[in-house]
Amino acid sequence: MARNWLQAYSVLDFIAVGMLLSVIAVSSQKRLESCVRTYVLNSWLLAAFVTVSAFYMGMPHLYIAAALTVLSKCFLIPYFLRKVLRQLRVTHDVEPYISAPLSLLAAFALVVVVFSFVSQGVFVTGVTRNALKIAISIILISLFVMMTRKKAITQVIGLLIMENGLFLAGFSLTYGMPIIAELGVVFDMLMGVIILGLFLTQIKKAFVSVDLDKLTTLKG
Amino acid sequence: MRGGRVESLQFLLIIFFSPLLQGFIKKIKALSQGRVGPGILQPYYDLIRLFKKDMVISETASWIFHAAPFVTFVSVLAASVITPVFSLQGGIFKAGDIIAIIYTLALGRFFMALAGLDAGTGFGGEGSSREATLAIIVEPVLIMAIFTAAIAGGSTSLSILSRSANIFRSPAHVLAFAAFYVALIAETGRVPVDNPDTHLELTMIHEGMVLEYSGPYLALMEWAHFMKQMLLFTIALDLFFPFGMQGGSTALGLAPAPGIYLIKVFIMGVAVALTESTRAKMRFFQLPSLLGGAFVLALLSVITLIMLGG
């Protein structure tokens, strides 16, 4: 009954499109706090996607993956990010390389590119078949975010969202990896964020700013 | 086809209820801001009073100034006639192509902008220039949002489209509705884009264009504006929330439809009023980023529709 309902109202499609929208929102946001908040939203949606498809396919071990996602990506990682933000005392990404409307359009163009290429070889079937295209779009858009921003912290957020996209892509292809692999990935992400946070504070100490353009001037 | 007697008179609802909708939105706005506000029938009194008054017409005004109120009113009227309001039955809706409706409205807008220039005041020209600039950005948003519904429905005829649209089953329709909503706010001259309540010279767009009008002409212009607002609400409902419109052409099947329609319109009015009271007016030069965002939403809705296969 509930499964028919999920199918009829294409709940999974709604969640995946929500993730795509939140990534596109990040590509035009300037305030770092709202970038972090959108990342949290994106992670909640990812967890919801995993939960709904776990219910849909009757695979209880996926609930653990969802719980891990919520724990790490909705609470721990944002907590560290906010802590780093407070330490660095930056609130805004000063002028990205291209303007907000233009990056919105570029994000849209990436979606079109993904659509026109991925649709040629649809090799995923079942409930998550649409998620693969959206996942690849998310990966490309977050790569684009990393390329066009100057602040190191935005690039970290881009990397994190890219990881969400990869998770979604992997999930839509394999219906979830073994739980030990999930654990390893989550642990890696946590360590990565902590190390990047330390790294950022060191950059801030050495160069006074976290603007990555400044890193091109070498110090002898 | 026998249907089309009563059904083709649906547009009367738009003509006579549009001032009520305006009064209702104003009342909701006032209440949400903690004011008492004018009575809900105030727009009717305003129109009646204006129709009784004399006119003052600028010396530089040409025939365009005299023609514009009629062209504007009639273009909105023509668009209303071919729009299914509360029932999809009716022979005349075979002429009701959604693209025709949007561009019939554009004719009225064109004349309104010309009239703003014609009277020869600075404010009129300012209003016209702003209206034209906005129109360039708003129109693609409207059309792209409509295309989403049109692709899903396989037609550009509103009466066929409304049979298939269902916002709750397709994420593309949600995106398209969001884009359409922003465009609707811009088209009806509401707060983040234009302020309908003031004649403050720096911000007015619609008010700037009709500034030189008085008496019956002003009444026509204002009435056309109310009707356009209700018509756009109707189109949004037709495209995205067509519940209760499928009733048969018997009197009994048709009876609940106008009631359902009015409830839907007034719910939408509440939404618009709340949007208006919770937002601040944007600077004119910030508008392209708002509308650009809406445009990207509309584009995304089309691509999502194609990507997810309807």
Image (tube, rainbow, N blue to C red):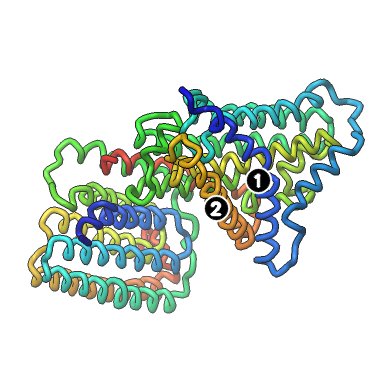
Residue B170 at what x, y percent from top left?
33, 47
Front residue of this view, candidates B274 and A81: B274
Closer to the chain start, of discs 1 and 2, is 1
Q: At 28% from the left edge and 61% from the top edge, which residue is drawn?
A: A159
Q: Amino acid at mark 2?
A: Ile
Per the image, the residue denoted by label 1 is B189
Indicate the quadrant containing the N terminus of chain A: top left, top right, bottom left or bottom right: bottom left
Q: Quadrant of residue A35?
A: bottom left
Q: Which type of secondary structure does the marked residue at label 2 adopt?
A: helix
Is residue B25 depicted above or below A106 in this figure? below
From the image, state whether disc 1 or disc 2 is nearer to you. Answer: 2
**B14 or B282: nearer the eye?**
B14
B82 left or right, relative to B127: left
Judged from the image, the secondary structure of the residue bearing numbered disc 1 is: loop
Residue B149: x and y in percent read 40, 38
The kind of residue on which mark 1 rests is: Gly
Q: Quarter holding the C terminus of chain A?
A: bottom left
> What residue sits 39% from the left and 64% below the top?
A38
Q: Is residue A103 visible?
A: no
The answer to which image quadrant residue B24 occupies is bottom right
Q: Does residue A148 sit above or below B11 in this rendering?
A: below
Q: Give residue A163's mark.
A: none
Name the subunit of mark 1.
B
| Residue linked to disc 2 | B263
Cα gap from disc 1 to disc 2, whole angstroms? 23 Å
Circle 1 crowding by C-alpha within 10 Å: few under 14, some 14–19, many from 20: many
Q: Is residue B115 above or below residue A8?
A: above
